[in-house]
Image (spheres, rainbow, N blue to C red):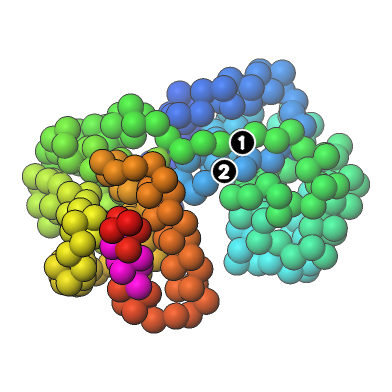
Amino acid sequence: MNDKNETAMWTEKYRPGNFDEVLGQDKIVKRVRAFVKQGNMPHLLFAGPAGVGKTSLALVTAKQLFKESWNENFLELNASDERGIDVVREKVKEFARSRSLRNIPFKIIYLDEADALTKEAQQALRRTMENYTQTCRFILACNYSSKIIDPIQSRCTLFKFKPLPEEDVFRIIENIAENEGFSIDNESKKALFNVSSGDCRRVENILQGCAAISKKINTSLIYELASAARPDEIKEVLSLCINNSFEKARDKLLKTMLHYGLSGIDTVKQFQSNIWGLSIDNKKKLEMIKETGEIEFRMVEGSDEFIQLEALLAKFVLINSK
């Protein structure tokens, strides 16, 4: 067996096959399961952040509908790789014009990151959805449904996915730890949930990196692999600003950024999430949040990161010296 076949078999083994394996999206799973029981479904539009189960649910839907022949009746494309109108005209149409091999009267085309399609390609896709409704159903996945043109949205049933809650992330972590043979305590699970923001894919990637280094995973290892500072270190920088210690705050921030390899954008986002926990007046918190937004905009526009972060710390000091 060659490496390509081995990789395909390994990938297939760990891809979900049952609705119960899709966690954190109970209402959506219930509605999609009802479509499968009926043996029919409309076009579907899955919208939500990365790593929350959109692709997994599409795969489970195909497997439950088509059983062992799901591979022949399911086409998976990534629109961010193939964004143009030719993809819709050639690959999608070629697959859509032939009938299903089972008693289900349609095939499924799963188009991931559909919001990366150009407007022209989306218009071509709209016509394809109209012309091949009898033989094909589309499942479109995107991060932002607002980037999908209205004619496509009106032809689909929209499902809004949400980040996974803490209890479901913990279940995933515990399941992986049991299967892969490493240990992780509750504090480390919470740290992993905090740095992943409910993104299951990010959880798994960080765990894989940590497990390659040590079979006993702790918070320090997680924050290093995630390129994120510990919350208490960020709070220390903010506390120094509140106490008018600009130079100490700057030195602490530089040391923290170098230790964890933080980018300026990452640092600003961590400031923003930790400001709300400070014991200061709410109006000052609002002013500090406003400044983080301004600095992030400047960084996105190409300004020097450390100069902007110094300016942000100076603003924090001024706000809290009033």
Residue 321: x and y in percent read 28, 58
Instruction: Tell whether 314 sits left or right of 231.
Output: right
Name the magenta segment's main secondary structure. Answer: helix
Check if mark 2's residue and mark 1's residue have beta carbons within 8 Å: yes
Horizontally, residue 236 falls left or right of residue 7, namely: left
Quarter of the image holding residue 264?
A: bottom left
Question: Where is mark 2, residue-wise?
Answer: 48
Instruction: Name which residue type carries label 1.
Output: Lys
Above or below, 47 relative to 298: above
Quarter of the figure with the N terminus: bottom left
Q: What residue sits 63% from the left and 40% below the top?
A: 46
Q: Is residue 257 visible to the viewer in this orientation of the structure?
A: yes
Q: Is residue 75 above or below residue 173?
A: below
Q: What residue sits 44% from the left and 68% below the top? A: 295
Q: Nearer the viewer, residue 296 or 196?
A: 296
Q: Is residue 77 visible?
A: no
The quadrant of the picture occupied by the C terminus is: bottom left
Residue picked out by circle 1: 160
Which quadrant of the figure has residue 212?
bottom left
Q: Give coordinates of residue 71: x percent, y percent.
A: 59, 43
In the rendered structure, does residue 168 fall within the stretch colored magenta? Answer: no
> What amino acid type is highlighted by mark number 2?
Gly
Q: In the figure, 184 relative to 209: above or below?
A: above
Write the start and end of the magenta stretch as one range: 311-317
Q: Point out which mark residue 197 bears.
A: none
